[in-house]
């Protein structure tokens, strides 16, 4: 026999006493209606897919042509629109998860090729998202992941092509160089915040430009620029300094994925199990209370930006030591520095959530290529979908209004509204 006490304890927080759900299905429905953060995230993704479908229809030429005689034959418009939407999203899925053509023995499409491309794109996004998320936890907005990534790529790339070391040592030294370069670049913004009171948003944005134009300059310097070339490209990184492929040379995924997962595990331990992580979260939650408790706020700012820069530097290593191009170019960052901000927002600045968000965005990046190749749908639509996801997550009240969810009374407030301070 079930007692009233047991029913009360099992009911989700925020449910009125007279409306206690009974049974698992009722609890699932109640959790959905309460709209916790997971539900809001999923519904934000659904809304973004709908917005993307509208844009696909608008960009599709046959659909636009059918719209010209919509009132005469409306079925043509709906049919063309559905064909554009379905073929676009099918191509997105085939390019990121599974392509049915790969099941044929004579197919040139690798069985795990799409999933490999997803994980390949996800690794630097995860590292960049961790960089932004760790800073969020300490109350700082690290908008400088792009510059930290570029400096990390410069340092790792230089060691990769200018130094000649044994095969394993060469890779390790190149990774260390990228980590140190990114950490110093991020630590500079932290030092400016701690010692001079410079706002980290302004300083990190300006340091992005410094790093970018430093890269442009280096790509024109003899000894850094590729031998015998007048193009803005560096000498190629030696094979001894390249990250090895995980599933063979035919698939793109490499050891940068392992590095990203280990970094996420390290960030989880740092934030939840270490004294330093407690201090960083305390400063992010309330710097005045932390200072009263004897914690050094300036040193916390410098420390967290060193860590954030090191993670972004690792993303730069993934780009130059594990990317498709073994040489530095002006677009080595591939907009990862700014996409990392949206990954961190979608992942709620938590290491586990950042990994999942990075994989999602990696899938969108991988699938966008095939979607454009097969259907002609612009890849920019995928970027719009990414932005809309974050827009809806940042406005949970809009999601609640669209899906008529109850106002959450416990646990439903987003991490953004809390200031990302846990």
Image (tube, rainbow, N blue to C red):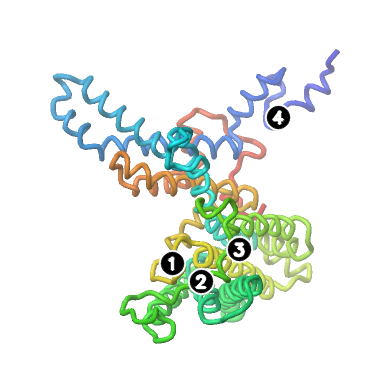
Residue at x-position 44% and y-position 64%: 325
Q: Which residue is mark 4?
A: 12
Badge 3, how many Cα within 10 Å: few under 14, some, many 20+? Answer: many
Earlier residue among tags 2 and 3: 3
Question: Reading the chain from its start, which is encountered first: label 1 or label 2?
Answer: 2
Taking depth in this image into account, of 134 and 232 the one nearest to the observer is 232
Where is mark 1, residue-wise?
332
From the image, which quarter does the N terminus lie in? top right
Location of mark 3 (residue): 135
Question: Closer to the N terminus: mark 4 or mark 3?
Answer: 4
User: Marks 1 and 2: CB-CB under 8 Å?
Assistant: yes
| Residue identified by numbered label 2 | 153
Callout 4: SS: loop
Distance, label 1 to label 2, CA atoms, is 8 Å
Where's residue 375, x and y in %?
Answer: 30, 39
Crowd band around label 4 with a 10 angstrom C-alpha radius: few (<14), some (14–19), many (20+): some
């Amino acid at each position: 026999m079930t007692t009233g006490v047991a029913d009360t304890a099992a009911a989700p927080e925020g449910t009125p006493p007279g409306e206690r759900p009974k049974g698992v299905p009722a609890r699932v429905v109640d959790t959905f209606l309460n709209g916790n953060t997971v539900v809001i995230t999923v519904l934000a993704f659904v809304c973004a897919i709908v917005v993307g479908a509208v844009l696909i229809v608008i960009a599709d030429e046959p659909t636009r042509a059918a719209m010209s005689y919509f009132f005469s034959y409306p079925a043509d418009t709906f049919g063309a629109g559905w064909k554009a939407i379905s073929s676009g999203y099918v191509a997105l899925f085939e390019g990121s998860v599974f392509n049915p053509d790969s099941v044929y023995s004579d197919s040139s499409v690798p069985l795990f090729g799409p999933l490999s491309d997803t994980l390949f794109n996800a690794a630097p996004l995860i590292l960049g998202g961790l960089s932004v998320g760790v800073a969020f936890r300490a109350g700082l907005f690290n908008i400088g992941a792009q510059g930290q990534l570029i400096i990390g790529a410069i340092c790792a790339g230089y060691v990769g092509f200018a130094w000649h070391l044994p095969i394993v040592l060469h890779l390790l030294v190149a990774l260390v160089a990228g980590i140190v370069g990114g950490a110093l670049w991020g630590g500079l913004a932290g030092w400016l915040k701690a010692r001079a009171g410079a706002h980290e948003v302004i300083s990190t944005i300006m340091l992005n430009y410094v790093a970018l134009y430093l890269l442009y300059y280096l790509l024109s310097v003899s000894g850094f620029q590729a031998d015998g070339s007048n193009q803005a490209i560096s000498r190629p990184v030696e094979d001894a300094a390249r990250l090895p492929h995980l599933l063979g040379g035919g698939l793109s995924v490499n050891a940068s994925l392992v590095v990203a997962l280990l970094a996420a595990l390290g960030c989880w331990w740092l934030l939840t199990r270490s004294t330093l992580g407690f201090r960083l979260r305390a400063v992010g939650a309330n710097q005045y209370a932390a200072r009263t408790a004897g914690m050094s706020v300036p040193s916390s700012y410098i420390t967290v930006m060193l860590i954030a820069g090191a993670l972004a530097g690792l993303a730069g290593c993934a780009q130059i030591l594990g990317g498709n191009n073994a040489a530095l170019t002006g677009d080595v960052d591939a907009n990862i520095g700014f996409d990392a901000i949206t990954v961190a927002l979608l992942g709620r600045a938590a290491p586990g959530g950042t990994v999942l968000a990075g994989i999602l965005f990696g899938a969108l990046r991988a699938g966008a290529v095939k979607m454009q190749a097969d259907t002609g749908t612009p890849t920019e639509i995928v970027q719009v979908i990414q932005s809309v996801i974050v827009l809806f997550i940042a406005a949970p009240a809009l999601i609640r209004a669209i899906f008529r969810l109850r106002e959450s009374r416990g646990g439903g407030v987003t991490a953004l509204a809390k200031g990302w301070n846990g």
